[in-house]
Image (cartoon, helix red, strand yellow):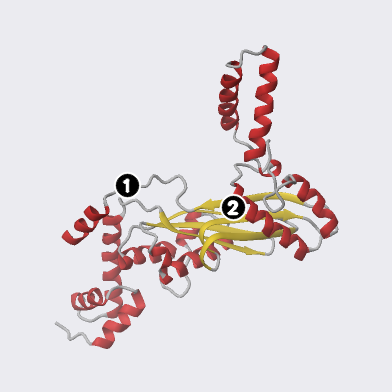
Amino acid sequence: MAEISASLVKELREKTGAGMMDCKKALGEVQGDLEKAVDWLRTKGLSAAAKKAGRVAAEGLVGVVANGNRGAVVEVNAETDFVGRNETFQKFVGATTRIALDTGGDMTRIASAPFPGSSRDVQGELTNMIATIGENMSLRRAATISVSDGVVAAYMHAAVASDLGKIGVLVALESTGDKAKLAGLAKQLAMHVAAAKPQSLSVADLDKAAIERERGVLAEKASQSGKAADIVAKMVEGGLRKFHQEVVLLEQLFVIDGKSRVSKVVDEAAKLVGAPVRLAGFLRFELGEGIEKKSEDFAAEVAAQLKK
């Protein structure tokens, strides 16, 4: 068996990010060949990742990036919020978000894109982190937004680092007007979206099934009033208008001033920037939304870990 020097172990550790004992074992398995040791660790990393794949990953980070007239948002999940404070994980999410900006948000292209400063692709880098950090992780979703002439602004709520946190928002404004002033408005609108959580940009964009569910609830409530059918119909339509004002971005009250509709704020921005303004779209990613989190006994979880 080849003698494994401390410097060789150190080099392998720096190259792969794996633990010291794992690096020493890998080098021993391949008689000190550095490149073969890298492959050995990757193989073991894949095995470790497979064992962890069944565990619920609902924590992690959302990353956003905006560059002129385009932007991208990405969600990468992990099992615990501790990983969100891990510098290696943060760098991964940040780099992956920038990659998403250049790949149009396509998940397959993102996963197969070369990861900066590594011989691995994005998915390979994620697999290596799973083996190194010891938690199940997943590149859950990504999206991009852009305008032909205008700005895209990013806002991160509950940030743990620059452009990384719990709620990431992008807002796109289309206009030939002053871009600096336009960017200021877009940032305010992004903050509004983070707080108000709109379901759609306009009434026309609102999910038809959601409208019908709301109409059914309103109709049932109104029918219990005992009023005439024409009055009930008006009550339902009035209720739907209120519903639109709660969930449609352009119909919501702007949280910055608490009195103007967002649609009016956008229309009046023409005076500020020197040209008509159109709110072209928005993206809002909230960490873990839609993921069913398991509720487990913490003491039992620790005991289970100790038995491994």
**Left or right: where does residue 272 sit relative to residue 16?**
right
Pointer 2: what residue?
A: 194
Q: What's the residue type where badge 2 is placed?
A: Ala
The C terminus sits in image quarter: bottom left
On the image, the x and y values in percent for residue 296 come to 29, 49
Using the image, determine if residue 116 lies above or below residue 256.
Answer: below
Per the model, the C-alpha gap separating discs 2 and 1 is 27 Å
Q: Circle 1 sits in a helix, a strand or a loop, which is it?
A: loop
Q: What's the residue type where badge 1 is placed?
A: Ser
The N terminus sits in image quarter: bottom left
Q: Nearer the viewer, residue 159 or 170?
A: 159
Pointer 1: what residue?
A: 295
**Mark 2 crowd level (few <14, some 14–19, many ≥20, 10 Å Cα):** many
Q: Residue at x 64, y 52 (%)?
A: 192
Q: Residue at x 45, y 44 (%)?
A: 290
Quarter where residue 182 is shown: bottom right
